[in-house]
Amino acid sequence: MKASWEAAETTARLQELATSLKERLDTGENVISVGHPVELFEGLTRAGIAPAVIAEPVFTAEVGETAITTGDDAIYVIQLKDILPPDADDPSTTILRQIWSQQNQQALSQDLFSLFSQALLDDAGLSLNQTAIEAVHAQITQ
């Protein structure tokens, strides 16, 4: 019982301290001058953040924003200083660009095909009964 109370009390006091630090940082105080251990990270990617519990607050924050997050028996005060563009020489950036390009090309092709098909139907004066088509497809898959 005592250990549980001590853990809860420690968490509450750390939360109070984190809130106080966040307020100081929000008023413009330098993170180095707050008098507590500080870890500075530069050039982080989503995959490069450990512990993972701080990834979402970091990547959803606006520049200059300070956030508090908890996890792994710790409380983190996070302040985002800058957002850097992706490293063009990083192989993962190249792969992501290729994937996005392929997805955009596929989506554009599908859209063009749909528009062309609809234009042909409209020019011919035809219409399709989508409900009937779906009913036939449902019978085929059974």
Image (cartoon, grey):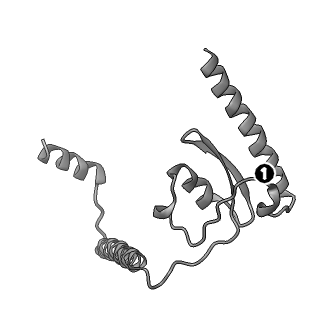
Relative to 1, is 41 above or below? below
Mark 1 lies on residue: 22
Q: Find residue 33 and report its image quarter.
A: bottom right
Q: Position of residue 8 (x, y in %)?
A: 66, 26
Quadrant of the frame with the C terminus: top left
Kind of residue at disc 1: Lys
Look at the numbered disc 1 and give the secondary structure of its residue.
helix
Q: Position of residue 50 (x, y in %)?
A: 51, 56
State left or right for residue 78 relative to residue 53.
right
Q: Position of residue 49 (x, y in %)?
A: 52, 59
Q: Find residue 85 and report its image quarter.
A: bottom right
Q: Nearer the viewer, residue 128 or 72?
A: 72
Q: Nearer the viewer, residue 60 or 33?
A: 33
Q: Find residue 70 and report its image quarter.
A: top right
Q: Position of residue 104 (x, y in %)?
A: 39, 75
Q: Residue at x 31, y 70 (%)?
A: 125
State left or right for residue 49 relative to residue 109.
right
Q: Residue at x 28, y 74 (%)?
A: 124
Q: Residue at x 66, y 20 (%)?
A: 5
Residue at far bottom of view: 89
Q: Residue at x 54, y 68 (%)?
A: 44
